[in-house]
Image (tube, grey):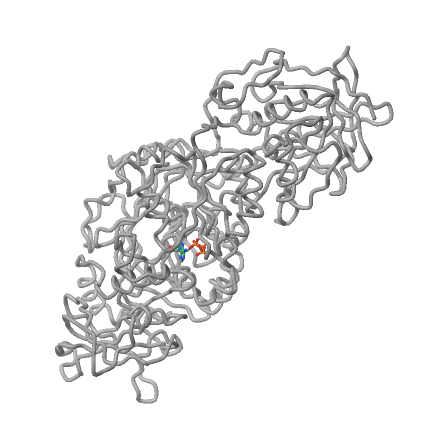
Amino acid sequence: MPGVADVAEAVIVANGADTLLMRSEATLYSSQGMLSGLLTLYRDRLEWSEISDRSSNTLTISMDVLFGATLSPPNKFKFKSIEAASVGNLSIKSSTHFTVYTITARENGKRPLCDTWTFMVGSEEEGATWLSLLRFAIKPKPADENTSVLVLLNPVSGKQKSLKIFETVVKPIFEIGCTPYTLKVTKLPNYAHELVKTEDLSKYSAIVAVSGDGLLHEILNGLLLRPDWAKYRNVPLGIIPSGSGNGLAKSLDSIWPEQAAVAILKAQSRPIDIMSVMQASGRTEYCFLSVTWGLLADIDIESERMRWAGAARFDLYGTLRIMNMRFYGGRLHYLPVANDEGDDDVNDDDGMEEMGDAKNPWGTRDNKEEQRDDTPIDAVDALAFKTTVMKESHGPMQSAGSSATNMHDRTNQGADIAWGLPAPNFSSPLVRSSPKVLNDDNSPKVQPAVTLHPTLTAGIQLPVKQGSLPPRWHTIEGPFAQVIATNVTWLSSDFMACPLARISDGAIDLVYSCMPSKWNMIAYMAASSKDNYMNTEGISHVRARAFILEPSGVRTTSRNPSSLQALQPQINRAMAVKNTQRSPSPLLSLLRSKSANRANGKKASDSILPQAPVPARVRSQVYTSYHQQTFGRRNSLQIQELANTRSIDTVAVEAKDSTSNPIDPQAPAQALFSIRSETASALEALEQPVSTTNPVAFPVEIAQPLPVIPTPVVNGISDSKADDDSREECRLVGKHGIVDLDGEMVELGPIKVECLANLITVVIPPWFNEGHNARVATTPVTKAPESIMGTLSREGSMLSFNV
Ligand SMILES: Nc1ncnc2c1ncn2[C@@H]1O[C@H](COP(=O)(O)OP(=O)(O)OP(=O)(O)O)[C@@H](O)[C@H]1O
């Protein structure tokens, strides 16, 4: 065995990233056997250099990718998984051996590699010191021993693998990284919402969802509904992706659970903008991801029945939807952001900002992005350290580097005590430099929002009358194939909504298409995982501080504008009706609350939760959407016919108190509800099949008559079958819920949306580089082994390496 010197030093050689924490001789276990060398721990990296006359190998591990250290058995143990590693090593209390854990990227977006590196040092005491200092260096933020990470897990997200992901990946990483957590599994929709709204949050250092984006949306809204939300706005929200979309995780460069778990234990965070979405009823929801209307919302909501296909459901249903394009009538009003640079007062409503350029929003910004993206992300490159070090079974050793410039800004946060770490039992003096403010170049200087109240749209009356908008607002007339308002680059793991979106730039990126051709949309969707696709014909983009969406309630499958124009007077009347503020219909509320209770296996009266409105889009077991087509005024509707079968597809409802159709007085007064569900949950929600002899009445308020949009006549027969696109030309879609907020559906109606800049914080991984991420989603930068170029020399008991 190579000699292990008893030298171990801890001295300060420089401030910041180069602060030396410890150095001692250490043997590295490798595929070549045991290599004697010198191990050095800096604040930003762990370096090992071989001491040998024959070869001089080095290993550099960036602190960004080093996530744990444990004592290990006195021989190299090969772990098959991170779970096995944690079970094998965590119980060891003393040893001359220790193992460090790294996460490194692999080519082509493959699952990252969790790897281990085992060293042997001279004594058990030295091993314990190494362990203590490594753990100190790994966690860049103070850890309060009285707090834990609150983990909320949705067992039915995506393909229902959340629990497995937590047990096999997240839990071991948290344990190895010494991250205490409190796990709570959600029992029903809105569970997390209520919990976060009422829980004592002072116990938690972060709130993390193991789910898709929908559960985090609940968490966010629960948080912002608290009277003391401002106190907890800086408790970072994190996500371990296990849903079908996972847009936020992808946008934060943590699409693999390993990456997300490491990001959480590293405890780095960054502010993020939030969109407040106010509906006509006054109900306000908050979104971190997106508000979508039209194509994308339809794909997301209507592909629920294809959940078995996982993320592929979006592609499959998306193709179908594009082949039968729908265009929605309505208007989009927006307030453009002023010039990107120097406009740091996003909540300022002083009316002095410049007009945006909706036609060419790219303009100078592209150049700025170019510069940002070219920032070197791997300053370790600059050192040109070349290695030929061999690595054990996992193939060639990789030196995981990351931006020293970035790390310079992210480390160096405080004194030992503030970090809450055990004092190192090491005799040499250990000095820390003073805390440093995080200065991330990617984060524009935007004033954080201080209020949840609307400031930019508050005075705007709906419906928006011509000439009534404040200065600098723009209006785009529909019909629209889609409108996407996004705060992040990716809306799902393979759909890039807007490469220019930034999480904390105080702007909402609006991407919209009015009447694109099918082929435009196919090209757009096909290129949606790449860069620059937004130049596709038919796709427009503007950056806004606020916008108002006024759907007319009409959609058409015809690209001929006259099909909507001919109906304009009726549409206007419909809008006048729809824009009067109304609360959701009692029937919808009933369906929602019963669906929620059913997911929990409870009757309404058993419910432990307040009867808050439950989103109609309830996942997995219970999914209900409904269409309404109605003629004339009614005060209540009566169920006339319910098929006595669980596979019921349509429920016909006729008006109890009939009033004449204002357009055709001869027509029978009737209403048709089409309730669709993959599990017939609509029927279940009504509890019992209802016979015509014992009808049940559900009051449905329709304040004023709605106009009839004639359905096309095929072979002399008027066909009004809901959702039959092949026959649909132009129709009133009523309150068909097609506005999608981070995976939650809200009823179609006018919405006012504002950007609340930097309202909360989210967990980010140390390797997060937003400009870079927008182009190609990355994972920690790794360096392939290269030939060594330099010499290793000994000066007294110290070694130095010269390139
Ligand atoms: N125990 C539960 N049973 C049924 N539904 C639940 C439960 N817990 C949460 N939910 C609901 O499931 C909805 C969707 O969950 P989530 O976003 O985690 O998964 P997903 O839809 O598969 O992912 P994505 O949003 O990425 O597509 C949430 O909005 C929440 O209301």
Query: Outermost residue toward the right?
Result: 54
Q: Nearer the viewer, residue 34 or 375?
A: 34
Seen in the picture, residue 41 relative to 538 is either above or below; the reply is above
Residue 790 image point, x, y percent: 78, 23
| Residue 257 falls left or right of residue 744 | right
- Where does residue 136 sit, x and y in percent of width and height? 56, 25
Res 363 visible:
no
Q: In the picture, residue 700 is in which quadrant? A: bottom left
As drawn, 662 above or below 130: below
| Frontmost residue, 127 versus 370 | 127
Does residue 527 appear to the left or right of 50 in the view shown? left
Q: Residue at x 26, y 52 (%)?
A: 610
Using the image as rendered, state which of residue 223 and residue 726 is in the foreground.
223
Q: Quadrant of the C terminus?
A: top right
At x 36%, y 79%, the residue is: 645
Indicate left or right for 363 with 401 as reference. left
Residue drawn at x 77%, y 35% as measured from the top left = 30
**In-image side of 126 versus 254 (left or right):** right
Residue 267 image position (x, y, % from top left): 49, 33
Image-quarter location of ligand 1: bottom left
| Quadrant in which the N terminus is drawn | top right
Q: Is residue 609 visible?
A: yes
Q: Looking at the picture, how far across and down is residue 472, in whole percent?
A: 27, 43
Q: Nearer the viewer, residue 414 or 81?
A: 81
Indicate whether 75 appears above or below 327: above
